[in-house]
Amino acid sequence: MTEQQQNSTDWSPRMVVCVGAVVLQGERVLFVRQAQGHPLEGRWSIPWGIVDPGESPDAAALRETREESGVADGWLPVSRSCLAGFA
């Protein structure tokens, strides 16, 4: 690692819990395009994001789907959830 790279890391590593939502309607799948300014700008993905402190993963998945897609709550029944950990 160069000295410049070492000096540019002013953050400490931290663990966060992230969620992604696979939203199905019949055989259709909801994808969202990542917003301008996002590191994945213009790329398609499922709605995803970080679970806020005190928030359940299911609630975070619904919130992220609403925020990223604008889809109304009535279209977002939670029928299954799955948690997976990665190191």
Image (spheres, helix red, strand yellow):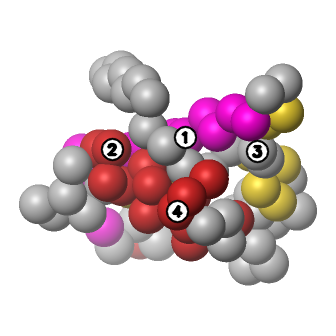
Q: How far apart are marks 4 and 1 (CA)?
A: 13 Å
Q: Give the range drawn in magenta.
A: 11-25
| Residue at image mark 2 | 58
Q: In this orientation, does residue 3 appear? A: no
Q: Nearer the viewer, mark 2 or mark 4?
A: 4
**Marks 3/4: CA–CA distance:** 14 Å
**Which is nearer the N-term, disc 4 or disc 1?**
1
Label 3 vs 1, first from the N-terminus: 1
- Residue 38 lies left or right of residue 42; in this view the side is left
- Label pair 2/4, CB-CB below 8 angstroms: no
- Residue at (85%, 53%) from the top-left corner? 43
Q: Residues within 10 Å of mark 3 (few under 14, many from 20)?
A: some
Residue type (three-letter) at the residue carrying disc 4: Asp
Q: Mark 3 points at which residue?
A: 30
Sequence order check, earlier mark of 2 and 4: 2
Classified by dominant secondary structure, the portion drawn in magenta counts as loop
Q: What residue appears at the point 49 percent right and 43 percent down from the top-left corner?
A: 77
Q: Which residue does the numbered mark 1 point to in the structure image?
A: 21
Marks 3 and 1, how far apart in space? Answer: 9 Å
CA gap between label 2 and label 4 equals 13 Å
The relative height of residue 55 versus residue 79 in the rendered view (above or below) is below
The amino acid pointed to by label 1 is: Ala
Q: In 3D space, how far apart are the residues under numbered discs 2 and 3 (Cα atoms)?
A: 17 Å
- Residue 73's tag is 4
Q: Does the magenta stretch include residue 14?
A: yes
Image location of residue 57, percent across then percent down: 29, 44
Nearer to me, 6 or 75: 75
Q: Which residue is drawn at 21% across and 49% down?
A: 56
Query: Circle 4 — which element?
Result: helix
Q: Sequence-wise, which precedes: disc 3 or disc 4?
A: 3
